[in-house]
Structure formats: C-alpha cells, structure tokens
Amino acid sequence: MASERADIGIIGGSGLYAMEGFGEVREVAIETPFGSPSDTLMVGMLEGRRVAFLPRHGRGHRILPSELNFRANIFAMKVLGVERILSVSAVGSLKAEYAPLHMVIPDQFVDRTSQRKSTFFGGGLVAHVGFSHPFCGPLSKIMARSCAEAGATYHEGGTYVCIEGPHFSTLAESELYRSWGMDVVGMTNLQEAKLCREAEVCYVTLAMVTDYDCWHPEHDSVTVEQVVAVLGKNTAMAQAVLKAAVRRIGTEPRGCACARALKNAIMTAPGLVPEKLRKDLAPIVGQYLK
C-alpha cells in the first residue's frame, strides 16, 4: 500500500523516540529474514514528505546497543522504499571545542565493536562494498545546512569511534581515543552505516553531544543522570534539524555513489547463489542477480 511506503527514513537514538509534527501516521510491523526490527515502524507525513520513523532502542529504550538487530532495522527501511536515512545518536565529546548541546556531523568511523553483525552477506553470497567514505556526502551537506537553519551549534566533519558498550569508556580508553584524533564516541551508528551502504541507502548521522566522556578534568565520569539532563535540550534541537533536512531533501534521482554501491561489489557467480538466499535478499540484490 502507498501508505506503507516512504523514501526518507529517520532512526531516533537515545531521547528521540517519536517525531513532532508527524501526521497521517500508520504503524507498520515488518518481519525480515533477520528477525524483527527494534519496534514497529511509524510511517506518515512530515514536512510534506513520506517518512518512516524507527526508535533505535525501541519505545521505552529497551534494547542495549549490542542487542540491536541492525540488519532487521535497515532491511525493514529498505522494504518500505527508503533511499535516505537520517540517523540521530547521543555521543560523548573527545574534544574541548565539541561541548554538550553541540551537534556533530561526522564523516569517518573507527570500529571498536566485537559482538555485532555488520553485513547482509554470507552463507553462499559474497560482496565487498566500498566504505572509505562511510557517510553520504550530499546528505551530510544537507544535514549541515539544516543545522545552520535550525540555529544549532554544529561541527561539520570528524571521526566517530564506535565502542561496544554498554559501559562508558575507561579513562585510559578515552585518552587513547583522543591520542588517535577521534572526535566523538558512541555505541550504535557504525553497523547502520555499513548495512546502509550494502543496501544502497544514503546515510548520515546527527551526533548530539551530551557529555565530555571521562577525559575532561571537570567531568570525571559519565552518568546516565548527566546524559539524560542534556538529552532533553538536545532532542528539541534535533527535531528542528530533522524537519529542516526533510524539507531540503530533493525528489530527483540520487547521483551519489551510495545509490550504486553494489554494482561491482558482488563476487559470487549468480548461478551459485542459494535460491533461498536470493529470495530473502531480493530487496537488496534483486536487480543484480537476474
């Protein structure tokens, strides 16, 4: 049904479990070959566009970062027709100039996770997508302009180090990441970016700074109480930024590399791909496995 289709997706992180101004909302439950997403997806109208919204940790924040079914979340967005995903995430700052309440639009990742599924492939189908630039360039520019429009204090570019969690960093780890030149630290976005690239979905992160991790002399340790206190203010600004971004996204066909990431990435001969796998992954690989 048309009411269950969307071309823009929003994944809400800590503190962002619903979207203000969302109209004609329909809840859509999607089962994927990888299991269930974090929650039912809410599909409706936002700023004149059809948008699918998913709270990353489920409504009520029930799911640990390492428990997230990233594959089901991104696959469900793909099934709905989503071509661009705006992701929101709470992060700790590793630089003095990135203060709590600031927004960061990272352009790179470093992976420090170890327990997560990061690919749709395997089991008889091999693909290697390019990931040197993990975020969509044009979509990142839209996010930056939207931050400016909303009046946010923001930083364009930077490296997001993704840790396993759910614990916050030790002081030694925090100092190590700083010595590497990392900008922010979080627990969720890397797997989403990898899976979006495989699914040929554009992806960008709006990283909301909630704290200075534990390296800052005036912030000896990070607490949930501290993070939640800042999240309320951050989330209000994030809502304004996301609305501006939705307004700015065009309806013309995408010209970025994300839209054709799988074109030369599949290594397995089509005749050798297991039929069940071909069927399960049809929303992602169907056009390439005729």
Image (cartoon, rainbow, N blue to C red):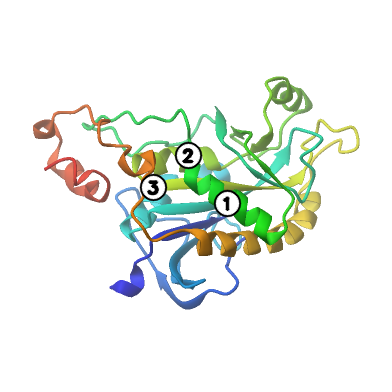
In the depicted structure, whether residue 27 falls above or below residue 53: below
Which residue is farthest left? Answer: 271
Q: Are marks 1 and 3 in contact (CB under 8 Å)?
A: no
Mark 2 lies on residue: 191
**Amino acid under label 1?**
Met
Q: Residue at x 15, y 35 (%)?
A: 273
Q: Are marks 3 and 2 in contact (CB under 8 Å)?
A: no
Whole-number angstrom distance, CA of label 3 to CA of label 2: 13 Å
Residue 88 appears in the picture as rendered: no
Residue 187 appears in the picture as rendered: yes
Q: Residue at x 38, y 53 (%)?
A: 83
Horizontal side of residue 100 vs 154, given as left or right? right
Mark 1 lies on residue: 143
In the depicted structure, whether residue 270 falls above or below residue 199: above
Horizontal side of residue 247 vs 122, given as left or right? right
**Amino acid under label 3?**
Val
Mark 3 lies on residue: 201
Q: Position of residue 5 (x, y in %)?
A: 34, 67
- Of tags 2 and 1, the one toward the viewer is 1
Reading the chain from its start, which is encountered first: label 2 or label 1?
1
Q: Residue at x 32, y 54 (%)?
A: 32
Q: Position of residue 278 (x, y in %)?
A: 18, 43
**Amino acid under label 2?**
Gln
Whole-number angstrom distance, CA of label 1 to CA of label 3: 16 Å
State which quadrant residue 250 falls in: bottom left
- Of tags 1 and 3, the one toward the viewer is 1
Whole-number angstrom distance, CA of label 2 to CA of label 1: 20 Å
Q: Secondary structure at mark 3?
A: loop
Q: Residue at x 28, y 32 (%)?
A: 122
Q: Secondary structure at mark 1?
A: helix
Q: Are marks 2 and 1 in contact (CB under 8 Å)?
A: no
